[in-house]
Image: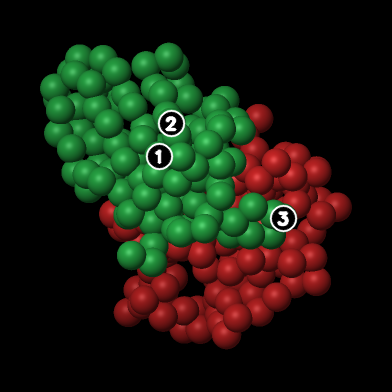
Amino acid sequence: GAGVSQTPSNKVTEKGKYVELRCDPISGHTALYWYRQSLGQGPEFLIYFQGTGAADDSGLPNDRFFAVRPEGSVSTLKIQRTERGDSAVYLCASSLLGSGNTIYFGEGSWLTVV
Amino acid sequence: RKEVEQDPGPFNVPEGATVAFNCTYSNSASQSFFWYRQDCRKEPKLLMSVYSSGNEDGRFTAQLNRASQYISLLIRDSKLSDSATYLCVVANTGNQFYFGTGTSLTVIP
């Protein structure tokens, strides 16, 4: 497809379980971003990839969160030992590198931890 | 201090009204500025980029004041379809994008 694709669109999991969220960026976009958004808040930065490497992972809240992008395209956000406070929509975005380029979002993965 | 600060509103305005949103940013070295629109339970979508000279797109006008580090969005002749959350976005030299909390707008018939 032409846009950013995220799967699953919805995920309900039990507290303590492991979750993987996948993002397929727009073809040719080198930069990939993960954000988390809770109700009534703006998107909160988690991690940013340039190619295969994480250029900035300062937004990951703790070591239960990890993300990879092994081939510089698809990325997976991994959450271990999920907690109820992890419930949010996880948004992936991609862009071309360079000043002034905008980022384009996928529809998000809605995670609910029960 | 947050990178980007916005008044969350809500703003409730009648159809046809003019409404303005402001946002401030903390990093004076920020490079690029945008307004995004987000509908309920949808992803944010680019509304417009913001340039130092100011720019207009139909009923929407965006302004940037680098000296005071604020960005504004003006919506003229509001339509019901303008009801949404408007997110102020600032990008730094490292290609990182920071979002405000968003300003909620409801246009009332």
A34 and B109: which one is in front?
Answer: A34
Q: Position of residue A82 (x, y in %)?
A: 26, 20
Q: Quadrant of the C terminus of chain A?
A: top left
Q: From this viewpoint, is residue B85 visible?
A: no
Report in which chain the residue with disc 2 lies.
A
Work out whether residue A70 or residue B57 is closer to the camera in this orientation and state it. Answer: A70
- Residue at 13% from the left image edge and 22% from the top image edge: A14
Amino acid type for the residue under numbered disc 2: Val
> Residue B106 appears at what percent x and percent y?
38, 66
Front tag of 3 and 1: 1
Mark 2 vs mark 1: which is more N-terminal?
Answer: 2
Residue B13 shows in this picture: yes
**Mark 3 belongs to which amino acid?**
Ser
Q: Which of the 4 image quadrants contains residue A55? A: top right
The local secondary structure at tag 1 comes to strand
Residue that mark 3 sits on = A99
Among numbered discs 3 and 1, the one appearing first in the sequence: 1
Is the residue under label 1 in contact with that under label 2 (CB below 8 Å)?
A: yes
Residue drawn 52% across the image and 58% down it: A28
Judging by colour alone, the chain drawn in green in this rendered image is A
Q: Colour of chain B?
A: red
Q: Whole-Å distance between the Cαs marked 2 and 1? A: 6 Å
Residue B42, quarter of the rendered image? bottom left
Q: Which mark is residue A75?
A: 1
Residue at 51 percent across and 64 percent down: it is B46
- In the image, residue A112 above or below residue B77: above
Q: Secondary structure at mark 2?
A: strand
Query: Disc 1 marks which amino acid?
Result: Ser
Question: Quick one: quadrant of the N terminus of chain A?
Answer: bottom left
Q: Nearer the viewer, mark 2 or mark 3?
A: 2
